[in-house]
Image (spheres, rainbow, N blue to C red):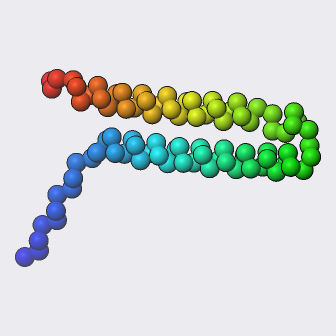
Amino acid sequence: MTPEPAPRPPFDRERFIFKTLAVVIGTQLLIYSLAAGVCGQRALQGRPVGQICPGTLEQLQGGFDSTLKLLLALLGGAALSRMAPPS
């Protein structure tokens, strides 16, 4: 007689969201680090600062702000779902 397979644990939605968010944030940091490195290297080559990757810092700040807002919204939603009475 063959043993029955162990039952699969239930899908953990919050864990999936946080892992996905971690991948997104990590990828975003990698891209921005690469862009900052390229811009910094161009700056060291003696090009005028105004012509080096215009808007890079603003895009970087905007990306981090968006990511932080998403993280806070997900955390707030998870907290609210835990506080809601069972229906």
The residue under the point 66% across, 44% down is 32
Residue lying furthest bottom:
1
The residue under the point 90% across, 50% down is 45
Position of the C terminus by quadrant: top left
What is the x, y in percent for residue 17?
A: 39, 41
What is the x, y in percent for residue 10?
A: 22, 48
84 or 38, which lies in front? 38
What is the x, y in percent for residue 16?
A: 37, 45
Please determine whether, in this image, residue 58 is positioned above or below residue 13: above
Query: Could you tell whether 9 is left or right of 2 in the image?
Result: right
Please determine whether, in this image, residue 56 is positioned above or below residue 7: above
Query: Could you tell whether 11 is left or right of 43 in the image?
Result: left
The residue under the point 73% across, 45% down is 36
What is the total number of numbered labels drawn onto the structure image? Answer: 0
Residue lying furthest left:
1
Query: Could you tell whether 69 is left or right of 83 in the image?
Result: right
Position of the N terminus by quadrant: bottom left
Please determine whether, in this image, residue 33 is positioned above or below residue 60: below
The residue under the point 66% across, 36% down is 60
What is the x, y in percent for residue 81?
A: 26, 28
